[in-house]
Amino acid sequence: MRWLRAAGPMVRSPAALPLGVMLGVAVVDASTGPEYNLLPVYAAGPAIAAGRGSIRNVVAMGCVAALLCLLFAAKADRFGELRMFVALVAIGYVTLAAVYAAWVRLRTERRLIDVQEVARTLEDVLFVPLPPVLGPVRIGASYVSASRATRVGGDLYKAVPSPYGVRLVIADVQGKGLGTIRCAAVVLAAFREAGPEYQDLTEVGRRIESALKRSTDGQRFVTGILAQISPDGQLLAFNQGHPAPLLRTADGDIRFIEPDEPVPPFGLTGLAGSAIRSASALSGAVAPCPATTSKVATTSVGALPSPRAAKAPLDAHIRSGPAPGLHPHDPK
């Protein structure tokens, strides 16, 4: 077993597979005799090296292939014959093509790494981890992107303290792509600025609406929940066309927090005229007893693009009031 562990780094080396292939060709060449000289087949070495190795590795495999070609040509008494020169030219051309392929691959990989670094930085800026405890509130949040390549999309959430209680937003931007991320960034920035400042929660909604009109192309809307948990544990929730949050009270009752009247999402409130002039027009407000738990999800199951995403949409669990022993990610 020790020799297997010692051979591990060698097997994982980019040169391992090309050398193994050329060694296999050499074994077959030696066993078949001079009648079936496989001299051009050694070109498989540099060709395979282009898939994983560096340019230097490809050139080295080309040199090994040429050396093996000369060695077995001499062994078969064909050194200096036309067949040997044809095989050397073939190895040379394949090596040049492999060098170009490796150069293109390495350039693409470097670009991909740069793009991933930018995306990772953007994700870290957009989604600062929520603290497990914020004032009288214990918060647990999880985010699972429907795309395997990225961690973020059009979903967003944020919680900020304010003199009036803990303010929260959880929302879903319509559409996909960079435009949705840009729109999500606008909503988050507006909420971070307005959430701690304005006493009226409807004014926070107006600021988000204004920011969307100023900073986006107006082609996307945002469904969302604005919520406030006061220091005494009372919950006020405003719904802008979002799936209704689920509320579990201290006595075990579970129900949806439905708005008093439907209100369009952010970006579409102009269709409803003065829909956000007052709290009653914006959405319904609820005031549950302390020590309740609320669960809010950004995406309904029907809107998710894959079964994998449907099993784990972004969700946030919010518990207000005295809650000793509750883990931030308690599913209750």
Image: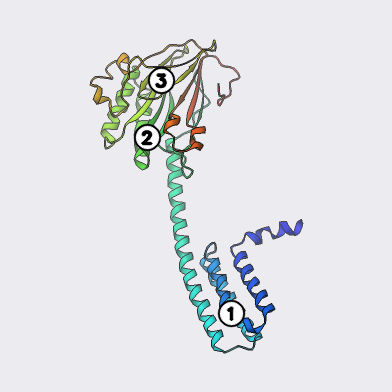
Can you give x and y, in whole percent of width and height, for residue 108 in the image? 44, 58
Residue at image mark 2: 184
Residue farthest toward the right in the current orientation of the protein: 1
| In-image side of 273 versus 115 (left or right) | left
Can you give x and y, in whole percent of width and height, for residue 195 in the image? 37, 24
Q: Residue at x 29, y 32 (%)?
A: 212
Asked if 114 appears above or below 187 in the picture, the reply is: below
The Cα–Cα distance between marks 1 and 3, rounded to whole angstroms, is 75 Å
Residue 325 visible = yes
Circle number at residue 141: none
Q: Residue at x 27, y 19 (%)?
A: 275
The Cα–Cα distance between marks 2 and 3, rounded to whole angstroms, is 17 Å
Q: Determine crowd level at label 1: few under 14, some 14-19, many 20+ residues with C-alpha closer than 10 A.
A: many
Disc 3 marks a residue whose amino acid type is Ala
N-term mark: 2 or 3: 2
Asked if 92 appears above or below 18 in the picture, the reply is: below
The Cα–Cα distance between marks 1 and 2, rounded to whole angstroms, is 60 Å
Residue 257 is drawn in which quadrant?
top left
Can you give x and y, in whole percent of width and height, for residue 185 in the image? 37, 35
Secondary element under disc 3, as helix, strand or loop, is: strand
Disc 2 marks a residue whose amino acid type is Ala
Residue 219 is drawn in which quadrant?
top left
Q: Quadrant of the C terminus?
A: top right
Residue at image mark 1: 39
Residue at image mark 3: 227
Relative depth, front residue between 112 and 37: 37
Q: Determine crowd level at label 3: few under 14, some 14-19, many 20+ residues with C-alpha closer than 10 A.
A: many
Q: Quadrant of the N terminus?
A: bottom right
Q: Nearer the viewer, mark 1 or mark 2?
A: 1
Residue 60 visible = no
